[in-house]
Amino acid sequence: MKSAVGGPIPREPAVLVLEDGQVARGQSYGATGTAFGEAVFNTGMTGYQETLTDPSYRRQIVIMTAPHIGNTGVNDEDGESARIWVAGYVVRDPSRVSSNWRAQRGLEDDLRDQGIVGICGVDTRALTRHLRERGAMRAGIFTGAEAHLATTQLLAQVQASPVMTGANLTGEVSTSKAYQVPAIGSRELTVVAVDLGIKTMTPHRLAERGIEVRVVPSTITATEILALNPDGVFFSNGPGDPATADSAVAMMTAVLTARIPVFGICFGNQILGRALGLETYKLRYGHRGINSPVQDLRTGRVSVTAHNHGFAVAAPRGGPFQTPFGSAEVSHICLNDDVVEGLRCLEVPAFSVQYHPEAAAGPHDAAGLFDEFVELMKAGR
């Protein structure tokens, strides 16, 4: 349903406080109240609904660099999960009109209904430059009466909030019970998808390729996975620090030992890295958006890709390296900052990428990775 054009919407004062003392004052957007989280920025020009509903944004305050947000409203089809996951939302100019034939309501309606505290009327690109220089950091959004408190009082609250390093969040976003996504058309293969924060489009992309997908909770054991006798195992994206995900690493290790084909994305890439004996580390400000150039080192091909990660894998470059499962190699790198964007095992059937080939809301350059997974599983038969 389209909203009518009108004058300025009356809004309460709001303030964004970063943990280094930086302050941005604006007006409330969405629900009123207080929100805390890690301040990060997203460079996508489109796809705000997919961003908001991505579980990987758990406990993060997302700053949108695109200046105008809400133009196309929201609908009941494009969400990447059943709810909004961001801790808070920061935009420059919220649209007063939802103008799209698929829009069912305005973006701010969903933010209010789900209790997501936001701020608008601030210079989001200046905030982005600040985070690029200083790194992602804790932040708080304060609206209403709290916005009038002394900055020192608000800063103390921000500095008392949890940090992202060491945060174990997959259990907070994973499904509580297994469910099945049927193959589209004839069933050719079956895959167990470990939900570490999975997006709705991912099992859909697998189903499009004749794969029956059984999405399972992050609490599943390796024994239970193996008992399902899948053709392959998929490890999804998700939030938090991969250094805390020991149970997921144990699952990955068991699957690699059983030589079942593996495909991991984002958090799943970090889990594969840890199972191979590599370390992970926190990026200065991460990759979040739908416009990151990644090069496939095997072919030299560059794809424009969707990202949402604040951690990465530290892996040797310049050729194969040894792991507990034989040799492996770095398969992809980000051309913006040379961060490892993919791993490939050479002696067991496993590979992963740090980005999002399901690409909701785009781009679709990397969709062929799902086809590579299909071929890996067929070869395993």
Image (cartoon, rainbow, N blue to C red):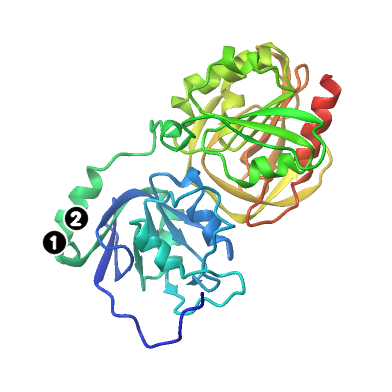
Above or below: residue 110 compared with residue 185? below
Task: Pick whichever, 182 or 46, lies toward us.
Answer: 182
Q: Residues within 10 Å of mark 2 (few under 14, many from 20)?
A: many
**Residue marked by disc 1:** 150
Quadrant in the picture for residue 183: top right
Callout 1: SS? loop
Instruction: Answer left or right for 140 relative to 99.
Output: left
Residue type at mark 2 is: Leu
Residue 219: horizontal and vertical position, in percent? 48, 23
Quadrant in the picture for residue 121: bottom left
Residue 36: horizontal and vertical position, in percent? 30, 50
Task: Pick whichever, 355 or 323, lies toward us.
Answer: 355
The residues bearing labels 1 and 2 have C-alpha atoms spaced at a distance of 7 Å
Q: Is residue 138 visible?
A: no
**Residue marked by disc 2:** 154
Query: Label 2 near label 1: C-beta < 8 Å?
Result: yes
Above or below: residue 338 compared with residue 258? below
Residue type at mark 1 is: Ala
